[in-house]
Amino acid sequence: MNCQTAESMVNRYIEHDLSVNELEDFLDHVENCPSCYDELETYFIVHAAMRQLDEESGDSSLDLRELLEDDIRRSKHYILKMKFRRALSGVGFCTLIAGLGGFLIYIIMQTL
């Protein structure tokens, strides 16, 4: 992923509107590109501050940079969870196909 693509995805990241593959590529790029990380941090902090003002929260001592790090950690956890689900689905599908194949072989062997 290049910087232009990553920068175009910042708002979608903040709104949690990226697919798992896009999210993984985006985080890989942002974590290895200081310029794009700074861009994300700026937008994230502005978004979080605006949300805090909208909620009229009395707690203005939030560490917004720490909120970004927490969000990135949660996003990575989400990616791992979704990869695990995909793998589990694949194993389940393969098991189903193997079971059906075995059943068909059994039926064919019974008719011979």
Image: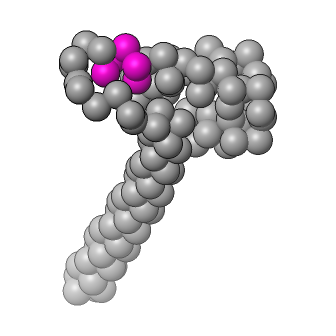
Residue at screen point 28% across, 31% down: 59
Instruction: Establish if 94 lies above or below 16.
Output: below
The answer to whether any part of residue 83 appears in the image is no
- Whether residue 51 appears in magenta in the rendering, the answer is yes
Q: x, y percentage for residue 49?
A: 40, 19
Residue at screen point 58% across, 42% down: 24
- Whether residue 68 appears in magenta in the rendering, the answer is no
The answer to whether any part of residue 3 appears in the image is yes
1 on left or right of 112? right
Q: x, y percentage for residue 23?
A: 53, 36
13 on left or right of 38? left
Q: How is the image coloured?
A: one colour
Q: x, y percentage for residue 42?
A: 59, 20
Residue at screen point 27% across, 83% down: 106
Q: x, y percentage for residue 77?
A: 44, 54
Quadrant into which the N terminus falls = top right
19 on left or right of 6? left
| Range covered by the magenta-colored residues | 48-52
Residue at screen point 23% across, 24% down: 57
* Callout count: 0
- Looking at the picture, tell me which residue is in the foreground, 107 or 71: 71
- Quadrant in which residue 103 is drawn: bottom left
- Looking at the picture, tell me which residue is in the foreground, 34 or 110: 34
Instruction: Establish if 30 lies above or below 3.
Output: below
- Quadrant in which residue 102 is drawn: bottom left
- Looking at the picture, tell me which residue is in the foreground, 102 or 80: 80
Instruction: Establish if 26 lies above or below 88.
Output: above
- Quadrant in which residue 30 is drawn: top right
- Looking at the picture, tell me which residue is in the foreground, 94 or 82: 82
Quadrant into which the C terminus falls = bottom left
